[in-house]
Amino acid sequence: MQKSISDRTSNQIINTTVRLRDEYGIKFDNRCRIFVDGANPSFIRALKARVSEDTEYEDQINRWKSENGANIVDLH
């Protein structure tokens, strides 16, 4: 029986995400993105660490907002 996403641990979801990224050759330099619900910052940091991105993403968002004002939109 297939497990639902809610039954999986954060680590399992991260492993699946990274596996799919690698399997399909997704590179972030060609404007591909992984979208994640912003409600769990610890999950986002763990995922970013696994894909070798800056885990201090909240500082980046705040900097972009201060530099661009209304051009940055929160989706939550």
Image (tube, rainbow, N blue to C red):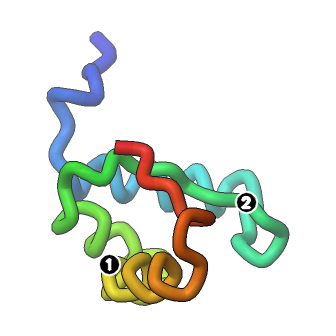
At horizontal 34% and vertical 46% (from top left) the residue drawn is 37
State the CA–CA distance, disc 2 to disc 1.
Answer: 20 Å
User: Which residue is nearer to you in this view: 30 or 58?
Assistant: 58
Q: Which mark is residue 58?
A: 1
Q: Quadrant of residue 7?
A: top left
Rendered-image quadrant of the C terminus: top left
Position of 22 compared to 75: left or right? right
Q: Quadrant of residue 70?
A: bottom right
Judged by depth in the image, the label closer to the viewer, 2 or 1, is: 1
User: Which residue is nearer to you in this view: 54 or 17?
Assistant: 54
Mark 1: secondary structure: helix
User: Which amino acid lies under the numbered mark 2 shown in the image of this protein?
Assistant: Cys
Please provide percent x and percent y for residue 75: 43, 45
Position of 4 compared to 22: left or right? left
* Image position of 4 with respect to 5: above or below: above
User: Which amino acid lies under the numbered mark 1 shown in the image of this protein?
Assistant: Glu
Question: Is disc 2 surrounded by few (<14), some (14 to 19) or many (20+) residues within 10 Å?
Answer: few
Please provide percent x and percent y for residue 55: 34, 84
Q: Which residue is mark 2?
A: 32
At horizontal 70% and vertical 72% (from top left) the residue drawn is 28
Position of 20 compared to 3: left or right? right
Please provide percent x and percent y for residue 13: 32, 48
* Image position of 14 with respect to 13: above or below: below
Mark 2: secondary structure: loop
At horizontal 63% and vertical 59% (from top left) the residue drawn is 33
